[in-house]
Image (spheres, grey):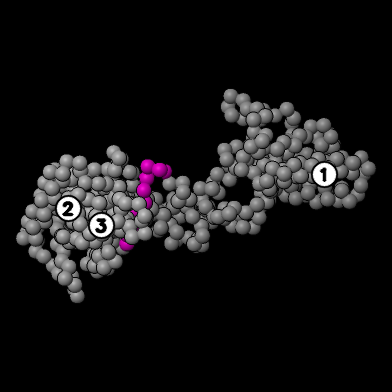
Amino acid sequence: MLLHIDYKKNGHKIIKKRIQQLTEKIVDSIERNEQVFFGLLNRCYANLYKSKIKSSKFPSREEVIRNLYIALKDEVKTLVINSDQEKSIKYDETGEMVLDTPYTVFIGAYAVTRGVTFKNLISFVFGRNSKEKCMDTSIQQLRVLGYRTLDDLSVTRMYATYNMVQTWFKMYELEQEFKKCWANYEKTRKDIHYNELLDLVKMGVSIDKTFKVTNSSKIPKDKVKVKPNSFIVIKDFDVHKNKKRASKYLSRNRAFIKKLSKQYGIKQIENSKATYITAEVNAAKEILKNVHASIEGINGNKIGGFTEVISVLEKYNYIHIYTKDNRGRSHIRQDDNQKGRYDLQPHSGQDKINAKKISNGLPVLMVLIQNPENGSSFSVPVIWLVLYVPSSFDKIFLISR
């Protein structure tokens, strides 16, 4: 038997004491032949008998009473499993707990739902609700249901709160729908991203908005999220220590953008002086390459944002290139008392509006050439890149850093 009711260690002590008192009370009731107790036992026996397997041998009521009395008097141990008690628990070479009594009542919380699986568990009480409905957490919790033979399965009983049972049913529905969607994907080989597949599943299942597939904090550290209708900023960089090199690649990019203007033509944004170019995505990659060659990570660290930008560009054939030269926008934070801290928003509010206005389903690469004046920490002009990810992008997309 497993009791998962209270997460506090003091609560475990109280539950253990109550179990021991109840055990003593049942033994005493059998010895005294108390009819109230036997009335309850008869109801329990009838309930179990309904679910027995026809091919299995089911003990008589008298056998149950006799074995129950012997077990509760001499063969049952109450064992608390929490961080205080874990070290005292012994395991065999297969990872199974070594128990010194035929029957055990386990009491626990987090230590129980984090990787322990119980053999021959036939009674389970889950008296707590999860703080949030999350599929990966629920799957982990369900390990504590343990495993048993088919004969024992027919008399296994599980008790849980209404909310927890509903969460488990929703999780089951989601899993079944996911299998259907995945089978369809296997047949059609449609180019569909994993997270988009999950969105399709959720649309097909009545799952409330609070139900999550996984916790965002559990996304591996080598993965990042790229969201639709968002801006990716190249960050954590400084001008290359070789200033001639930095100026060289800046000049190269200016010449390349001028060439693109002639090749594709310049378009003006409605009700604005700002202009942009619509070009093949390889043009944006060339700009990225030149910018990367003109800057370096701060203190030798990796420049932030390039991986995310390139991963987004790989999904498109064309891109809008939005340029602003001779930028006078200061990139020193206005509320900064220390010199040299960069503003993480090199693009203005108007730049954001313009990017969304011209996107029309395509990403927008902002090529913002920053002058060294006006509060800038850069010693020479430098290009600061920002990519607008269109609202039509593949939902939340996980990529490797």
Q: Earlier in the sequence, mark 3 or mark 2?
A: 3
Question: Is residue 239 in view from this perspective?
Answer: yes
Given residues 214 and 186, the one toward you in this image is: 214
Based on the displayed image, in which of its 4 quarters is residue 343 positioned?
Answer: bottom left
Residue of label 2? 381
Front of the two marks 3 and 2: 3
Residue of label 3? 375
175 displayed left or right of 282: right
What's drawn in magenta, residue-wise? 220-232
The residue sitting at 17% across, 41% down in the picture is: 242
Which quadrant: the C terminus? top left
Q: Is residue 385 above or below residue 8?
A: below
43 displayed left or right of 98: right
Q: Disc number at residue 206? A: none
Q: Is residue 197 above or below residue 115?
A: below
Q: Which amino acid does the dot numbered 3 rest on?
A: Gly
Q: Marks 2 and 1, how far apart in space?
A: 80 Å
Dot 1 surroundings within 10 Å: few (below 14), some, or many (20 or more)?
A: few
Rendered location of residue 51, percent (x, y): 70, 48
- Residue furthest right in the image: 32
Helix, strand or loop under label 3? loop
Q: Is residue 146 magenta?
A: no
Residue of label 1? 22
- Residue furthest bottom in the image: 271
The residue sitting at 29% across, 66% down in the picture is: 349
Front of the two marks 1 and 3: 3
Helix, strand or loop under label 1? helix
